[in-house]
Amino acid sequence: MTPADLSRTVLHAVRRAVDEDALRAPVPARVRVERTRPGGSGDYACAVALQLAATAARPAREVAEILRERVAGTPGIRRVEVTGPGFLNFTLDASADARAREALVQDVLERGLRYGHGDVLAGDVLQLSHAREVRAAVTAHALRTLARSQGALVRTSCDTSPDPDWARLGVRVDATGKPPTPLTVVRPVPAGAGAGALLERLGPDATRWGLLRPAGHDRALLGGELLVQTAGNPLFLVRYARSRAHALTRGAALLGFDGSYDEDVDAPVLLRALADYPEALAAAARHRAPDRVARHLEDVAHAFFDFQDSTPPLPVGDEKPSAAHRSRLAVAEAAGTVLAGGLTLLGISAPEVL
């Protein structure tokens, strides 16, 4: 069971409790679950009962007990406890968790670059407006892509005619001037340089990463460090991890085997990062924050290299390809798929060979 699955399970329990009149409170749009902190109980914890207690006019522990009764027995959950002032704590079933890991990897590989796309913004109509400034334009364009990946209808507009150099950054503007519909103004800290100058110095990929990686209220870092080909450059790290994952696939083909999740893989950090990717996309779209996607891709890249170093997907020396190698390769391919998908949504190329 992934964090997203567990979140949906708890949300369903809240809806059931409300429908059955066991709880009188508005059903939240989403429920957040997170890894249990040190000293806590179980694998995951959720504070939804504390959030609902005031509107339900009941103690949080009582609300938590109502929800615990409706979550207990769900396949994949071994135990549900109420702790502290009203936290729900979940211990997952190990065998079911292994099946969930297998399902996760298969889902990523089957959906490809569309893994993580969803419908959390279905029915939303967004009109993103920005000034004639390169960082605002690139941010609005990235938000347009991210929101559409979550089901929203999106248009972008610039208050004056677009800079012709924006096209070289892949930026599309749907309209100019002030549109008649309500606006969401995209106004990050300006880049301090024009698109033409940035492109000449950095090229399109490094320019877009440099503009999108910092949060909108932070200054964009647009120096030569974006072109350094070492792990200290997050852009290089992410793109190199993507190309390295593809290189493993090529190497496996030469050895006569391919990726298939036939045996459970001990890669909790990487698998958790892959499972959390859909929520990272949804949060970036909801909060108008493409930097969240960039940071998540960095997490996936770091976890991928740690996984590759600790459990090599390819046989070493006289080893023969085994079920373990096929499963590790499938996880590596899933990581490469997520990295490629995230870079593509940010408008950055994801080369197979770097």
Image (cartoon, grey):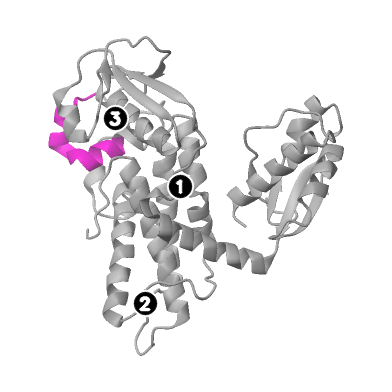
Q: Residue at x 53, y 62 (%)?
A: 103
Q: Residue at x 53, y 56 (%)?
A: 272
Q: Is residue 91 magenta?
A: no
Query: Do residues under tags 2 and 1 come within 8 Å of each other at their CB atoms?
Result: no
Query: Do residues under tags 3 and 2 come within 8 Å of each other at their CB atoms?
Result: no
Disc number placed over residue 138 in the picture, else none:
3
Q: Is residue 199 magenta?
A: yes
The quarter in which the N terminus is drawn is bottom right
Mark 3 neighbour class, 10 Å CA radius: few under 14, some 14 to 19, many 20 or more = many
Mark 2 neighbour class, 10 Å CA radius: few under 14, some 14 to 19, many 20 or more = many
Disc number placed over residue 314 in the picture, else none:
2
Q: CA distance from mark 2 to mark 1?
A: 27 Å
Horizontally, is 283 left or right of 11 in the view?
Answer: left
The quarter in which the C terminus is drawn is bottom left
Disc number placed over residue 62 in the picture, else none:
none
Q: CA distance from mark 3 to mark 2?
A: 39 Å
Magenta residues: mostly which secondary structure? helix
Amino acid under disc 2: Leu
Circle 1 is placed at which residue position?
A: 116
Secondary element type, mark 3 = helix
Magenta range is: 192-210
Q: Residue at x 68, y 41 (%)?
A: 11
Establish if 231 lies above or below 182: below
Mark 2 or mark 1, which has the lower sequence index? 1
Q: CA distance from mark 3 to mark 1?
A: 22 Å
Mark 1 neighbour class, 10 Å CA radius: few under 14, some 14 to 19, many 20 or more = many
